[in-house]
Amino acid sequence: MMEQKVCKLCLKVSNDFHVIDKIIGEIVDVLLLKIDLSLKEDNVICEGCGDSIFTFFEFKSMCLDSEDCMAPFIRTMNGMEVDIVEMAYLKENSVLLP
């Protein structure tokens, strides 16, 4: 018989789960989810919540990378209007380093 656990995030009972280890805990922190992992000894998340967390983490990482790419360019514009389309073109053509 497969062991079933309750997901720490959605509270669904599942036998497909991931133990919230150090890496998942750090991702939860980066996503600014306020989850107290000290309330229970064996914190787990279901497969669906795990997929969502990694998708959100990838999205947030992409946004931060874009911000890192744009910030130096915007600072050099000294208040002039910035053309985001031009920025995307420069990034795609490796003129701007991410």
Image (cartoon, grey):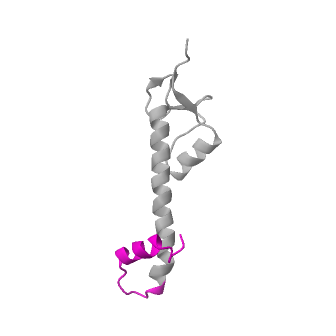
Residue drawn at the location 48% of the way across and 32% of the way down: 47
Task: Name the quarter where the N terminus is drawn.
Answer: top right
Q: Is residue 50 left or right of residue 37?
A: left
- The residue positioned 50% from the left and 78% from the top of the image is 95
Please report the bounds of the magenta region as a residue range.
Answer: 76-98
Frontmost residue, 35 versus 65: 65
Across the whole image, how many numbered discs are drawn on residues? 0
Residue 89 position in % (x across, y down): 40, 74
Q: Residue furthest front?
A: 93
- Expressed as whole percent of the image width and height from the top left, the position of residue 57 reads 49, 50
Q: Is 33 located above or below residue 19 in the figure?
A: below
Q: Nearer the viewer, residue 90 or 43?
A: 90
Seen at 43% across and 88% down, the residue is 78
Residue 37: x and y in percent read: 58, 37
Give the camera-side residue of 35 and 96: 96
The residue that appears at 48% across and 75% down in the rendered structure is 71
- Position of residue 5 relative to residue 88, above or below, is above
Horizontal placement of 19 versus 84: left or right? right
Left-right relation of 48 to 1 = left
Q: Is residue 86 magenta?
A: yes
Q: Quadrant of residue 44?
A: top right
